[in-house]
Image (cartoon, rainbow, N blue to C red):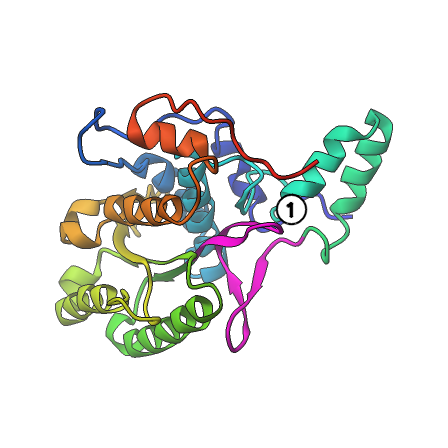
């Protein structure tokens, strides 16, 4: 039985104890600071291994980072998929069941789960209005349905050539997901290599425009939030190190606004007794409300 999956190479970089990403004070507008250093360390793994062109491995690093950012924001380790350990997708209610059974049975069930892709898959597939879609980062529960859905894409070369296809497929995916889950926070996160600025400046401008136009305008189409982030590394180095520079793109498409908008939307459509820890971190205050778990 395989003891690893496509995310396993990143597990050792994801700390169990997360820090607080909010940098504002009580009463101030929310200000979210992503951990770009962590993203750089994650993406350095496939780049240093010569696997940067293997889009799946590179994209897995982005997915692992975004999921970790949501855990930093206060969401539970089991409600954000992909999880930081195997299995990557595990319904919270199964986790609670494992906590309730005797230790010997728990260990046996946990081992069996790793071989049952139908129960605990590596990737989350969600039924949209017209078709099922693999969604890269998810917050969902059976009693609440999908609450947050994020699609990630990465582009390292041939920027202008592939951009129209990216725009077309992404816009269709937004309508598909929001058509079935109109209250969910649906996001699109696009990572490009920073060489686009020098090699294809026209494609860079079109990328920014695309990211803005993919957002919904009060109708059922478009994403709740979108973001563009540029990363780069020295391709001639024997030990390349990936760095992420949010300052290379306009502020309105940077990741900080993306996480703030996605989290704010999710909290705005759920009662105050849901995601209490997330609310406390964001509002910079203690909230005297018990978390509504609705299970067992």
Query: Which quadrant of the structure image shows residue 168?
Result: bottom left
Q: Nearer the viewer, residue 199 or 56?
A: 56
Residue placed at 37% from the left, 60% from the top?
154
Q: Is residue 155 visible?
A: yes
In the picture, the quarter occupied by the C terminus is top right
Position of residue 13 relative to residue 67, above or below, is: above
- Let me know if residue 230 is in the magenta part: no
| Residue 87 as seen in the image, left or right of residue 274 | right
- Which element carries disc 1, helix, strand or loop? loop
- Let me know if residue 143 is in the magenta part: yes
Position of residue 225 relative to residue 213, above or below, is: above
Magenta stretch: give its range: 121-150
Q: Position of residue 105 (x, y in %)?
A: 86, 32
Residue placed at 21% from the left, 59% from the top?
195
Q: Position of residue 199 (x, y in %)?
A: 17, 66
Residue placed at 52% from the left, 78% from the top?
130
| Residue 252 as seen in the image, left or right of residue 191 | left
Query: Which quadrant of the structure image shows residue 98?
Result: top right
Q: Position of residue 128 (x, y in %)?
A: 52, 70
Q: Nearer the viewer, residue 95 or 195?
A: 95
Q: Position of residue 39 (x, y in %)?
A: 37, 41
Q: Nearer the viewer, residue 200 or 149?
A: 149
Q: Please identify the dominant SS of the magenta region.
A: strand
Residue under numbered circle 1: 91
């Amino acid at each position: 039985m395989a003891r690893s999956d496509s995310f396993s190479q990143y597990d050792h970089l994801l700390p169990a104890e997360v820090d607080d990403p909010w940098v504002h004070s009580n009463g101030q507008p929310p200000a979210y600071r992503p951990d770009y250093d962590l993203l750089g360390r994650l993406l350095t793994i496939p780049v240093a291994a010569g696997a940067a062109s293997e889009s799946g491995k590179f994209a897995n690093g982005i997915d692992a980072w975004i999921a970790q950012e949501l855990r930093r924001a206060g969401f539970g380790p089991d409600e954000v998929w992909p999880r930081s350990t195997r299995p990557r997708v595990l319904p919270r209610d199964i986790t609670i069941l494992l906590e309730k059974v005797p230790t010997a049975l728990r260990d046996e069930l946990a081992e069996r789960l790793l071989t049952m892709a139908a129960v605990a898959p590596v990737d989350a597939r969600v039924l949209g209005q017209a078709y099922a879609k693999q969604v890269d980062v998810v917050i969902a529960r059976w009693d609440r349905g999908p609450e947050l859905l994020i699609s990630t894409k990465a582009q390292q070369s041939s920027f202008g050539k592939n951009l129209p296809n990216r725009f077309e497929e992404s816009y269709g995916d937004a309508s598909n997901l929001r058509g079935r889950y109109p209250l969910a926070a649906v996001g699109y996160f696009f990572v490009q290599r920073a060489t686009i600025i020098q090699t294809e400046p026209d494609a860079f401008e079109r990328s920014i425009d695309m990211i803005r136009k993919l957002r919904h305008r009060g109708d059922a189409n478009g994403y709740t939030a979108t973001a563009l982030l540029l990363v780069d590394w020295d391709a001639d180095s024997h030990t390349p190190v990936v760095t992420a520079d949010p300052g290379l793109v306009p502020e309105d498409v940077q990741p900080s606004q993306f996480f703030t908008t996605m989290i704010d939307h999710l909290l705005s459509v759920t009662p105050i007794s849901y995601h209490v820890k997330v609310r406390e971190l964001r509002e910079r205050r203690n909230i005297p409300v018990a978390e509504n778990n609705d299970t067992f």
